[in-house]
Amino acid sequence: TDEKVTISKGLEGIFIADTTLCKIDGTNGKLWYRGYPIEVLADKSNYEEVAFLLLYGHLPNRHEMDVFDARLKDEREVSSEIKEIIKMYSGKAHPNDVLRTCVSALSTYDDDMSDRSKEANLERAVKLIAKLPTIIAMIGRTMRGKGFVEPDRSLSHSSNFLYMLTGKRPDKESAKLIDLMFILHAEHGSNASTFSTLVTGSTLADTYSAVVAGIATLRGPLHGGADEAALNMMKAIGEPDNTEKYIEDALAGKQRIMGFGHRVYKAYDPRAKVVYKYLQSFMKTTTDPQIEKLLEIAIRAEKLMEEKLSKTKGIWPNIDFFSGPLYTAMDIPSDLFTPIFAASRMAGWTAHLFEYWENNRLFRPLDNYVGKLDVEYVPIDKRQ
Ligand code: SDX
């Protein structure tokens, strides 16, 4: 039958499930995790609490927090084989690809892959949330010819990451900034990488296979890779006075400015506002000329984009635009930005996966065939 088919490119506007994990108000630029405004969690909470909130549905009481925190700390170490993979591939492939490979390998340590109980899956989520920062820090160290720094139980989740990466225990300010970035990247509804995780999980594949799909999807510059791309653009601009010309030329050439635009936000991404606020307060206490230059370039680019695209086409800064300067302020190299995004979003991916499995249905959309039918088969010797 040739009934009228309407294709929703990129599944724009299509609802796939009910959720209580996250609400995004794209019109007004607002975001809640389990009903808590992102600004409140950014200022008052920490990543361990937010991960618990996403996985268990409520903020932990003191006892629940102590138990969850201890479980995460118990699971920070990685095996010698994983360390071998890191040594083998770091520097030869993008850190995100090394990370994806290590996460695939993690599944081989699972004591019982056939156990699909909620408890077993929550245990897998704890292992994944705990181990990714260790793997990423070890990749970063190996790429720069440095030895591994083993996890330190006295440090929080995100501070321990920074410690394993830099070898230095972060000061109070850096500890807050890195934890802020982990909180802001933890969850965001049915974005592309979460959707990949759900599509894979909807076949009843295991938790590891589902999050490996998520990590692979996050890799692209239109999604998780935008923060690295946005910083590279700022570095290419080089001097603040080059900003306007660079952006105008890019827009004239129909180029996309990384860190701007969003399928759902048609207003300023509230997470970008939070990053910007903390970046500004950071700048009041440190005089790092490189960061000052990056920030000035970012602010001038944002002003110009606001005139050119925000008010006219609803293209506003997203979380990836100011992240680069902030990570740079913590001496985090840009090729680790997407892996950090994956480490943080592991909470959102697993929380969505377990929520979806409560009322699972295989994802199987349609595509509209527009080719020929019943074509005659010609033997190869008779073909042109
Ligand atoms: C994340 O989904 C999520 O929630 C993701 C995320 C999360 O937390 O999981 O929020 C994280 O991925 C943030 C987004 C990071 N990506 C980027 O910054 C890459 C640059 N952004 C664009 O590629 C784009 O805005 C997307 C991919 C984010 C959204 O794309 P859409 O909704 O498919 O929009 P589109 O590609 O159809 O563009 C609509 C128009 C086009 O112009 P026309 O062809 O109609 O003339 O807007 C233009 C686009 O060219 N446009 C841009 C632009 N983004 C869209 N023009 C210049 N610069 C941009 N950044």
Image (cartoon, rainbow, N blue to C red):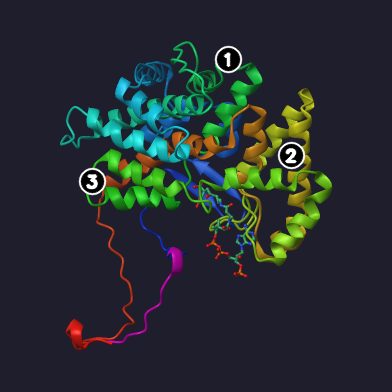
Which range of residues does the magenta coloring cover?
A: 1-10
Q: For numbered disc 1, what is the local secondary structure? A: loop
Q: Quadrant of residue 249?
A: bottom right
Q: Quadrant of residue 227?
A: top right
270 vs 2: above or below: above
Amino acid type assigned to the residue bearing label 2 in the image: Leu
- Dot 1 corresponds to which residue? 168
Which residue is painted at 45% across and 68% down in the image?
Answer: 9
Q: Earlier in the sequence, mark 2 or mark 1?
A: 1
Q: Nearer the viewer, residue 328 or 75?
A: 328
Q: Quick one: label 2, few (<14), some, or many (20+) residues within 10 Å?
A: many
- Measured as percent of width and height from the top left, residue 96 is found at 45, 39
Confirm or deny contact between disc 2 and disc 1 (CB under 8 A): no
Measure the C-alpha gap from mark 2 to mark 3: 43 Å
- Measured as percent of width and height from the top left, residue 217 is found at 42, 49
Q: Which mark is residue 205?
A: 3
Q: Nearer the viewer, residue 185 or 137?
A: 137
